[in-house]
Image (spheres, helix red, strand yellow):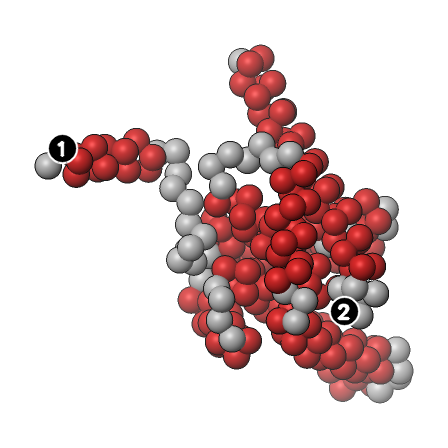
Amino acid sequence: MLRSFAVGYERFCRVVLMIAVTHVAFLVHTLMGVVVIGLFPSISATYTTYRTWWLDEDHSWSIRQTWTVFHRAWKDELAGANRFGWPQALLWLLLMFDYRVVNFHDAGTLGYASAGVLLIGMVFYGLFCSLSWAMRANFNESGWWIVRMTLQMVIARPLCSLCLTVLVILTVCAWMTWPGLVPAFGVALPVFFVMMIVGKFGKIPGMVRPTEDDKPRLRLQTTGTADK
């Protein structure tokens, strides 16, 4: 029992270290791109790093391995991530401006109703954005293709969408309750959970890992094929 606890605790610490290194890499590479150019490639590289880690058989990544995967992904996404991310950011600014206008100005019952609708819309837009970057990290397709597939995934994978919606709400609440989480882990922590949810419940081709129960069966099938 103590051995199992020690192994589990070591794995947990390695995951925390990987998330912490990813957060530092996110900050450094964002500044390398003077924020305007480096922000969205850093977001994309964070998703790609976690996807690579998720699919790797060995989850005991070193600091160097995490940094190397992040840096390569960041360089590859300097142009594409900005084309994909800036339209999303502009829509975010528009939604937040509208929410501020209707929420902090006395517009009567209609104003409160509009604020509620906008708040729900922002939650679902957060769901869409988080899932779209995960899809983009997994598929090398155009931005419009990613948008269409993300919208289909929101409908076709209700459990995944529900978990991501809860995660978006919990992330905002946690950041407001414990502001220290933002400088400590930034977006690296919620993105990690996004990729874990997508990997578990998204059933996306290219991100489905065989479970421990499936591995013996896969080995048996491979052996049987070889014998034939």
Residue plotted at (17% across, 35% down): 226
Q: Which amino acid does label 1 sit on?
A: Asp
Q: Of residues 215 and 162, which is closer to you in this image?
A: 215
Residue plotted at (76% across, 69% down): 37
Residue plotted at (76% across, 81% down): 94
* 9 versus 104 height, above or below: above
Distance from label 2 to label 1 (Cα)?
A: 54 Å
Q: What residue is pinned by disc 2?
A: 37
Residue plotted at (76% across, 64% down): 38
Q: Earlier in the sequence, mark 2 or mark 1?
A: 2
Residue reaching furthest to the right:
105
Q: What residue type is labelled 2?
A: Ile
> Circle 1 sits in a helix, a strand or a loop, which is it?
helix
Q: Of residues 120 and 96, which is closer to you in this image?
A: 96
- Which quadrant of the view contains residue 122? bottom right
Residue 83 appears left or right of 185: left
Q: Position of residue 193 (x, y in %)?
A: 61, 49
Q: What residue is pinned by disc 1?
A: 227
